Image (spheres, rainbow, N blue to C red):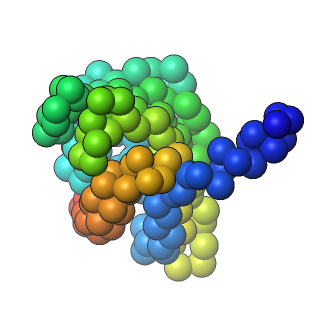
Amino acid sequence: MNNLAAQSAHLADTTSIVIDEVFPHRAEVLWRAITNGDLMGRWMMKPNGFAPEVGNRFTFQTTPAGAWDGTIRCEVLEVAPLERFAFAWRGGDEANVGYGSKLDTVVTFTLKRVQTGTRLRMEHSGFVLPKNDTAYTNMGKGWVKCVETLSTVAGEQA
C-alpha cells in the first residue's frame, strides 16, 4: 500500500466530535476562557501544569479504569492568538476495552469573529472506531456540556 493509500485508510477509520456555535462574546473573551487554566478548570476539567505555549505538557485527571491510571496527557500543539488553539489528548491503555481504551487524539478550537459575536468551532479528532466507541460516545455528550458551560464562564468574564 503506498503512503497516500495508507493515509486514506487511516482517515477512513477515524472520526471527530465537532461543535460549531456562535457565541455573543468577543473573540478576546472566548480566547481567555479557553487558554486560561483557572477558567478552563471551570468549564472542562482542572488542568495540571497548563500554559498556553506550544510544547507545554499538562494533564487532566479523570476516573481510572483497568490498566489506565485515569491521567489524560496533553501537549499544546498550536497557539494562534484569537484564532486557533490545539492540543494533543492522550490517555487510556491498550489492554482496556471500552472505557479507558487507548486514545491518541487532538482537540482544536478555532475562533472567527462574526457580526453577532464569535463563531467557535471545537473539533476533537482522531477517534479510532470501533476501538474508541465508548470514548467517542461519552466525550461527545461531555463536550456539549463543556461548551455550554464555556459560554457561561465566558459571559461572566465579558
In the picture, which quadrant includes the C terminus?
A: bottom left
Q: Nearer the viewer, residue 124 or 120?
A: 124
Point out residue 124 in the picture as x, y percentages from the top left corner.
47, 52
Q: How many marks?
A: 0
Point out residue 39 in the picture as x, y percentages from the top left corner.
26, 45
Left or right, 56 with respect to 141, comes to: right
Point out residue 106 in the picture as x, y percentages from the top left corner.
50, 41
Q: Nearer the viewer, residue 38 or 129?
A: 129
Q: Is residue 51 above or below residue 130?
A: above
- The answer to whether any part of residue 135 appears in the image is yes
Q: Residue at x 31, y 55 (%)?
A: 134
Left or right, 108 with respect to 40, comes to: right
In the picture, which quadrant includes the N terminus?
A: top right
Left or right, 141 with respect to 107, comes to: left
Q: Residue at x 66, y 44 (%)?
A: 10
Q: Residue at x 48, y 40 (%)?
A: 105
Point out residue 58 in the picture as x, y percentages from the top left corner.
34, 24
- The answer to whether any part of residue 31 appears in the image is no
**Which image quadrant is residue 50 in?**
top left
Q: Is residue 107 above or below residue 20?
A: above
Q: Is residue 57 above or below residue 47?
A: above
Q: Is residue 36 above or below residue 27?
A: above
**Which image quadrant is residue 75 in?**
top left
Q: Residue at x 75, y 40 (%)?
A: 6
Furthest residue in direction front, as rendered: 1
